[in-house]
Amino acid sequence: MGNSIEILGSRSLPAGFDHPHASEEARAIAEAGLILRVQVGSGVHGTSISGQDDRDEMGICLEPRAFVTGLARVPRGIDSDAEVEFEQYQRHTAWDRPGGLANRSGHGDLDVVVYSARKWCRLALAGNPTVLLALFVPDEETVFRNSVGAELVDNAHRFVSKLAAARFLGYLESQKAAMLGESGAHTNRPELVAVHGYDTKFAMHALRLGVQGVELLRTGRITLPVPEPDRTFLRAVRHGEVTLPEVLAALEESEARLVAAGADASVPDEPDRRWVDDWLHRSYLAYWATAER
């Protein structure tokens, strides 16, 4: 892994571009303090469709002392006098096209989010499925990792607990609701609904969450890409080769298995917050000592 990486380049941002986490100042913080960056999304799960998917990447960074112990803030996007705390840097290449933030990412686009280590740890300790994934990405899908990031990955088990059961179930149910277009949820892929009667991508991700949640609760790990035979079934769902009644039955079974796994999980009741707190303390102090010379 290299020692530095450019997040999305320092290109001039489009006129009118405005996102609370996409300022050039936020980008510079994310680049300078980067400790880990990996591919996430369908690509790493093994469920992507050639010629259709964008590339999703997630990173973790350490921010400067002034943003942790002081009152420093970053601008809220372009042409804004408002400032926000640095919690993450987020950029989608789709935003560079006419239409800006309203654009939907598609084939060839890159979506990047880089969390501050403190925010990422808060989410991971709570069992958030999205951020926990970064701990289990194989080397071939790792874009950047330094010694601090390596120590984090080597201690993935410190973050895993029974708290993940409720989070995975909640995420599964949210994807299921979006798949069906239920009240309060919606699909941004009406073309899939028109052809298949449901949003096949939401369906695939809902079922994937069930598979990965059960594995995490029973083994303390998530295997990437999704192992067979589950991967083949998920890809069939994604391609619309599985009927809606069959998908609903599979989701009902996934929910039941996830609830059962949460009840008899072999992982700890709570994550190792003491170790995480110590890792954050040591990592930030070491980064500040080096960065501020």
Image: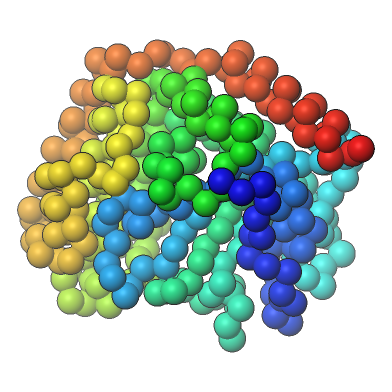
Query: Which residue corresponds to the image point at 71% horizontal and 39% vertical from the top-left?
Result: 62
List x then y, in percent, for residue 250.
13, 45
Tag count in the figure?
0
User: From this viewpoint, is residue 2 visible?
Assistant: yes
Which residue ends up furthest to the right in the rendered image?
293
Q: Residue at x 25, y 15 (%)?
A: 264
Among the 4 quarters of the image, the one containing residue 253: top left
Q: Residue furthest front?
A: 2
Between residues 44 and 91, which one lies in front from this camera angle? 44
- Residue 252 visible to the viewer: no
Front in this rendered view, residue 72 or 11: 11
As drawn, 273 above or below 59: above
Asked if 127 appears above or below 3 in the picture, the reply is above
Kindly identify the residue that appears in the image at 60 percent across and 21 percent down: 276
Which color mode does the image show?
A: rainbow
Rendered view: 16 above or below 225? below
Residue 22 spot, x, y in % from top left: 69, 62
What residue is shown at x 21% (from left), y 42% (from top)? 227
Foreground of the two, 46 or 99 = 46
Q: Please state the horizontal and vertical placement of residue 4, each as a whole percent of the image.
A: 68, 51
- Classify the position of the C terminus by image quarter: top right
Q: Quadrant of residue 139?
A: top left
Q: Quadrant of residue 228?
A: top left
Q: Is residue 115 left or right of residue 134?
A: right
Looking at the image, residue 102 sits to the left or right of residue 203; the answer is: right
Q: Position of residue 240 (x, y in %)?
A: 15, 66
Q: Is residue 292 left or right of residue 248?
A: right
